[in-house]
Image: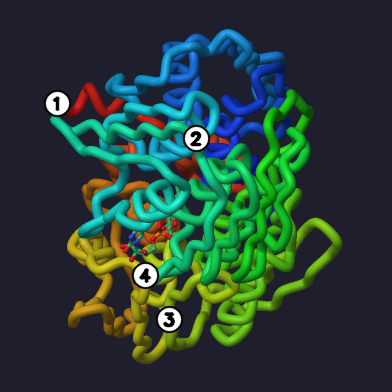
Amino acid sequence: MLSGEVSISGAKNAVVAIIPAAILAQGECLIENLPCIEDVSSLVVTLRNLGAKCEYINESTLKIDTSDVKDFCATDEGVKKIRASYYLMGALLARFKRAEVAMPGGCNFGSRPINLHIKGFKALGAEVEIEHGIVKLKADKLKGANIYLDVASVGATINIMIAASMAEGKTIIENAAKEPHIVDTANFLNMLGANIKGAGTDVIRIKGVEKLHGAEYTIIPDQIEAGTYMMAGAIAGGDITVKNIIPKHMDSLSAKLEEMGCLIYEGDDYIRVVSSGNLVATNVKTMAYPGFPTDLQPQMTALLSIAEGTSILTENVWENRFQYVNELKRLGCNVTVEGRAAIIEGVKHLSGAEVSATDLRAGAALVIAGLAAKGKTYIGNVKYIDRGYEKIEEKLRKLGAGIERIGTDDDEN
Ligand code: EPU
């Protein structure tokens, strides 16, 4: 059983766009509610390599001064590791009309193309070449354009928004993605002096400005971290309050947890989850926001594994995001994957075993399953979890979970 309160950190997928976007400021930005996660540390190193001054005022406040950034080449190891380094393309292109950025890495769940980002940059007037694993962008000047996204891509929407903020004239992005971190990045850019309207709807209008300036900004709470703790409460049973969140962002998950038998109470900035631990099966389909987030899909599989009955979980965003299922099976989950669907037969008990995280959210799913499993669960490759969850073991321990970090991933090799 879990009980008590857990406070949610700033949103990973917002901050990883906002830090590169600070390059546009050519001045000092103060970023508050910064999550203490590996993806942030990695981006800070990259920004320093480009010539920015980055200073932690405290654990959750970062001062970034991008006045002296002169370099437009970002090819260090960190860039290759994280997905969000693609935002350096939009940011460097906006500021210098040139960018050379290593192809982004990130969690591996099938093909993760960036063709729509490239389509957007080209529409704004950039020439794009990919050579030796480096994306090279060059423009005499950037000019506003009408850009229709074939797929409502989060990354392409944000990247085009960043680049178009300093393009000449007006840009319209149609079929834009609507995730909360898109709104957050647009709000940040507007604080810097950009003119962006419509973020959070599927048409975003941007009037380019010549110059931006520094600003202070507070990152929104992390929807996915919040959802992960709500599910931890649901699987372990008990009564927990997930604090410092925007409850509206959680609607699709709250509805599913209620269907499964949990009680959900919403306040202005918190959600209380009360669960007996006895859950019933349901069907879930991942969709772009405001649908059920793909980044909560693995955690949901873990939860449905102990729900009575048969559940079908359909992954509509990524082509291959079920690689973690084999690890869940080691804990006793009964899951069969057929194409984009996982069929989950609820079992009475899970039992602890040695497992390994295959990516960030898969790691979170193993933690959740481990909370319900009888006996001890050992999770390897926790470096993936550290990419996106701040102090996960500390936060869960405060709720009463028996979880500790033993050694580092390096010890395993
Ligand atoms: N797509 C294209 N072409 C593109 C870009 C995307 O076809 O140029 C397709 C993808 O193949 C995919 C779909 O569009 O099928 C959606 O991809 P999207 O571009 O929205 O994903 P992303 O921007 O690369 C972000 C998050 C992911 C999250 C997805 C979907 C960041 C840094 N990453 O990725 O987060 O799964 O949106 O919501 O914001 C995570 O946090 O664990 C994570 C993987």
Q: Mark 3 = which residue? A: 285
* Kind of residue sitting beneath label 4: Val
Q: Earlier in the sequence, mark 2 or mark 4?
A: 2
Q: Mark 2 = which residue? A: 141
Q: Mark 1 = which residue? A: 413
Q: Find the distance from the CA under tag 2 to the CA under tag 4.
A: 34 Å
The residue nearer to you, when weighing 158 against 341, is 158
Q: Is residue 237 above or below residue 406?
A: below
Which residue corresponds to the image point at 64% horizontal and 62% vertical from the top-left?
204
Nearer the viewer's eye, disc 4 or disc 3?
4
> For numbered disc 4, what is the local secondary structure?
loop
- For mark 2, does the 10 Å Cα neighbourhood hold few (<14), some (14 to 19), or many (20 or more) residues? some
For residue 364, side relative to residue 238 (left or right): left
Which residue corresponds to the image point at 50% horizontal and 49% vertical from the top-left?
160
Q: Which of marks 4 and 3 is nearer the N terminus?
A: 3
Q: Mark 4 = which residue? A: 317
Q: Find the distance from the CA under tag 4 to the CA under tag 1.
A: 33 Å
Quarter of the image with the N terminus is: bottom right
Mark 4 touches mark 1? (CB < 8 Å): no
Nearer the viewer's eye, disc 2 or disc 1?
2
Res. 304 in view = yes
Which residue corresponds to the image point at 41% horizontal and 67% vertical from the top-left?
297
* Kind of residue sitting beneath label 1: Asn
- For mark 1, does the 10 Å Cα neighbourhood hold few (<14), some (14 to 19), or many (20 or more) residues? few
> For numbered disc 1, what is the local secondary structure?
loop
Q: Does mark 4's beta carbon lie closer than 8 Å to ligand 1?
A: yes
Which residue corresponds to the image point at 45% horizontal and 14% vertical from the top-left?
50
Res. 396 in view = no
Q: Find the distance from the CA under tag 2 to the CA under tag 1.
A: 49 Å
Q: Find the distance from the CA under tag 3 to the CA under tag 2.
A: 42 Å
